[in-house]
Amino acid sequence: MPPTQPTAQQRYVSMLLERIRQDRYPSLQLMDRVEAAFWTSQQVSEYLDVLLEKADEAWYPSKQILDRIHRVLAYAAPVAEQIETRQQTRIGNGRAG
């Protein structure tokens, strides 16, 4: 079976993430766009990694980057908890994955 092609949404988010990663001072509008385009927890995680890299690059990271990290963590925590609960329920019911 040939590998599946990324969807237009996946390509769009990847493009935005790459631009944010490469730009020393990514625009707020670009970061707003990627935050509005999330569909998967993997995309949220990748974006969070990019933001953490940005914050780690500077001795005094920008308030905007730190605020976004905080917001993404606050958003992701309940989602991650729901996923973990579902996985534990599946394992407890004898269904892995």
Image: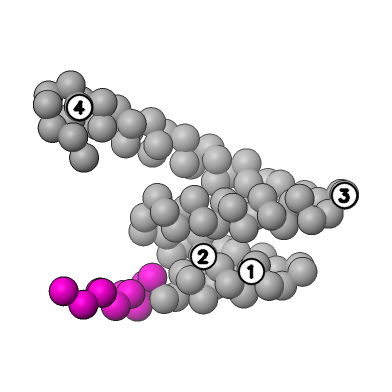
Seen from this angle, which residue lies furthest left?
94
Q: Can the viewer see residue 74? A: yes
Whether residue 9 appears in magenta in the rendering, the answer is: yes
* Residue at the disc numbered 3: 59
Q: Earlier in the sequence, mark 1 or mark 3?
A: 1
Q: CA distance from mark 2 to mark 3?
A: 25 Å
Label 4 crowd (10 A; few <14 / some 14-19 / many >=20): few
Residue in the picture at 65% in, 67% down: 21
Q: Is residue 22 left or right of residue 73?
A: right
Q: Which mark is residue 34?
A: 2
Label 3 crowd (10 A; few <14 / some 14-19 / many >=20): few
Name the residue type under label 4: Ile
Please report the bounds of the magenta region as a residue range. 1-10
* Residue at the disc numbered 1: 20
Q: Secondary structure at mark 4?
A: helix
Rendered location of residue 7, percent (x, y):
31, 75
Seen from this angle, which residue lies furthest front?
1
Residue in the picture at 13% in, 32% down: 95
